[in-house]
Image (tube, helix red, strand yellow):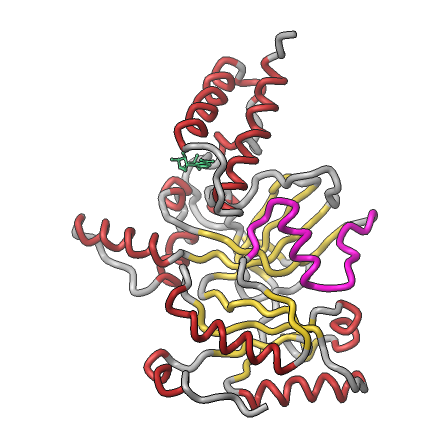
Amino acid sequence: MKQSPEQQIAALRLQLAEYNYQYYVLDAPTVPDAEYDRLYRELQQLEQQHPELVSSDSPTQRVGGAPLAKFSQVQHSIPMLSLDNAFDAADFSAFVKRMRDRLDLAGEFSFCCEPKLDGLAVSIRYENGVLVQAATRGDGNTGEDITTNIRTIRAIPLKLKGDNLPPVLEVRGEVFMPLAGFAQLNEQARQQGDKVFANPRNAAAGSLRQLDPAITAKRPLMFYAYAVGLVDDPAGYLNNSCHYQRLQQLKDWGLPVCPEIRLVEGETAALAYYQDILTRRASLAYEIDGVVIKVSNLNQQQALGFVARAPRWAIAFKFPAQEMLTTLLDVDFQV
Ligand code: NMN
């Protein structure tokens, strides 16, 4: 039986979203680009013939709207916090001891260990699986509405995968520019006699703060999710016992999560993670300035709570400045 245009459009969107996920999130495309492009053009043609069927979550609608005059403000429903820092193994050990004392815990913590990406923290709000708003961190309470720019980042789904979706889900994570894209962008700028960006972080910030989403769309930006903000989740899809599992759930919903994230048992293993990432830092596809180590158990997180503007249950374990690296790499941590 022949499908209606509506059915054809729905099927093409679903297929393209899946290919997009495989390509940008899993980094494992299953079809050649030519096939993806063919289906994309087919969708474009169908939407041109049936403009009433165009919806904002269609992959053809990533770049839309006229340039903004200015960004409007967004109030974060849950503040976007910063992190305390640790600069050496002693700081890290003191962090673990403080938590153990506070919880009167004799055993070890499970830690979710993540590279600390050098980009910009953003919050992206999905309602019933559809991307409706995105904001910068700003001062932690109020950020800028960068929805039209976030929509141009191909790795960020306009619509989440699956049926088990919460009515409201705020995803927090980092927008950054991978090193290869950064090098290409600067090479292009050099050839055109334009100003080059000092580093990938500046390039990512400059790209996200464009008032014209058509410019942002041309910038090679990437996103990794690392936390949730406000959720309305009556079915309890995110009622996992652990932060790491929550990240796996975000990934299942189609959100990109950094493949270097690990769940480890105990302080020694967390330090080993730090060392491992530090050793491999130069071979990663993006810039990082440390690792973030979080207590993964959500009950423990809750019991630990927050102090001032940072959680007690997480720390940014910073890498030494680049020039100090060679000497420090050979030094073992005292645990
Ligand atoms: O602008 P979009 O549609 O995201 O595409 C950019 C490039 O990436 C195109 O060349 C496209 O072919 C490619 N792409 C390929 C796949 C795939 O599954 N082979 C998926 C998404 C994008």
**Residue 215: where, in percent of width, then height?**
36, 44
Which picture quadrant has residue 334? bottom right
Name the residue at 67% across, 62% down.
244
Establish if 322 lies above or below 200: below
Number of marks: 0
Residue 242 among magenta residues: yes
Q: Quadrant of residue 293 in the image?
A: bottom right
Is 73 left, or right, of 40 in this rendering?
A: right
Say which residue appears at 79% left-offset and 75% top-offset: 303
Q: Quadrant of the N terminus?
A: top right
Q: Does the magenta portion include 28?
A: no
Q: In which quarter of the image is the C terminus?
A: bottom right
In the orientation shown, which residue stands out farthest toward the top?
1
Q: What stretch is highlighted in magenta?
A: 235-257
- Residue drawn at (48%, 30%) of the image: 60
Relative placement, left or right, of 145 versus 171 is left
Residue 164 pos. (x, y %): 75, 42
